[in-house]
Amino acid sequence: MPFRLLICYAHPDDESFGLGGLISKYVASGVEVYYLCATNGDVGTVSPELLNGYASVAELRLAELAAASKLLGFKTVYTLGYKDSGMMGSEFNQDPASLWYAGQHKPAEIVRHVVEAIRDCKPHVVLTFNKYGGYGHPDHIAIQRATTEAFDKAADPAYVTGHEPWRAQRLYYSSIAKWAVQIGVWRARLMGKDPRKMGRNADIDIQAILDHVEPVHARVDIREWFEAWDKASACHVSQLSGGFRIVPKWARPVLTPYQFFTRVHPAPSRDRIDENDLFENVTAEA
Ligand SMILES: [Zn+2]
């Protein structure tokens, strides 16, 4: 029986920009990979000419996700259809249809959606953002909280949905090497920029990213998958000017040969890298 991986992220592009190499590697090795995308990404900034032929930003971004999914080879994509909440403090945080608002006012609703996805695809491994949502995005934080809670609830027979309970064996948060973020902070200062106000909209705080990095327990070699990573990312044309590609292509084999993960369940006895694969200690039969 193949291994199954469920990734619970927030936006159409998180899967490709964040994990395009890792997903391609696992799909090629026979792992069934599923994507739960909690929002439609409808607050993302989009140049008007890209909207030709689409009724809305949401429609465009979901079409980009469909193209990326085809390349990546997801078995199923679950879309929850919440509205993008924008960055922390934006007016969109208060839109009742947004994921952040739902997380603040009716968190059980998001948890239920994630439990239903877990029970439907029966993953051995579940992956979501870290507690800071990678770079502080409210949607990332909301899906991290819901997924962490849903991981246990999915296994609880007392929590009733249309599906049978399912106990996934592992829960990971995506992480990053602390030294790589530290270089980013130094680089920003050297260039005369404020590391707390980076990115196109000056709303990315690299110092806070550094302060919130959680311990790394697993690292996966993705050196052979940079091209697949780029191809999937290229599907999200409307988001490519966002400055997410901080590491230049030539430097990637040196700076980002691995993808790092924090193991949340089962809790590690100490903080060190003791796994080179997310399925290293997983049994496929379960
Ligand atoms: Zn995102």
Image (cartoon, rainbow, N blue to C red):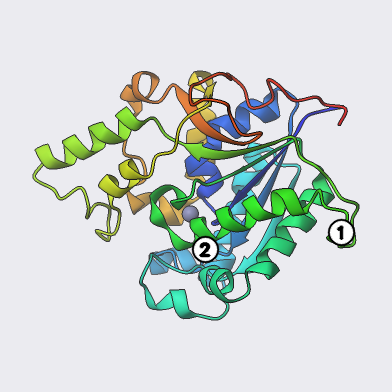
Residue count near mark 2 (Cα–Cα under 10 Å), binned few <14, some 14–19, many ≥20: many
Q: Is residue 269 left or right of residue 126?
A: left
Q: Residue at x 48, y 22 (%)?
A: 272
Q: Residue at x 71, y 48 (%)?
A: 151
Residue in the image at 58% along x and 29% along y: 268
Q: Is residue 69 above or below residue 138?
A: above
For marks 1 and 2, the one nearer the N-term is 2
Quarter of the figure with the C terminus: top right
Q: Quadrant of residue 269?
A: top right
Say above or below: 5 vs 63.
above
Residue 164 x %, y %: 91, 52
Q: What residue is disc 1 on?
A: 158
Labelled disc at residue 61: none
- Whether the residue carrying mark 2 lies under 8 Å from ligand 1 is answered with yes
Identity, as a three-letter code, of the amino acid under mark 2? Gly
How far separated are the C-alphas under marks 1 and 2? 34 Å
**Residue 271 in the image, given as x and y percentages of width and height:** 48, 26
Name the secondary structure under disc 2. Answer: loop
What is the number of the mark on residue 41? 2
Image depth: mark 1 or mark 2 in front: 1
Front one among 245 and 152: 152
Q: Nearer the viewer, residue 77 or 134?
A: 134
Residue drawn at x 52%, y 50% as measured from the top left: 13
Dividing the image into 4 quarters, which one contains the N terminus? top right
- Figure quadrant of residue 145: bottom right
Tell me: 78 left or right of 202. right
Q: x%, y% of residue 22?
A: 57, 30
Can residue 120 be seen from the camera position used here?
yes
Q: With respect to residue 207, does 202 lie above or below?
A: below
Q: Residue furthest front?
A: 269
Give residue 121's position: percent from left, percent from top: 81, 46
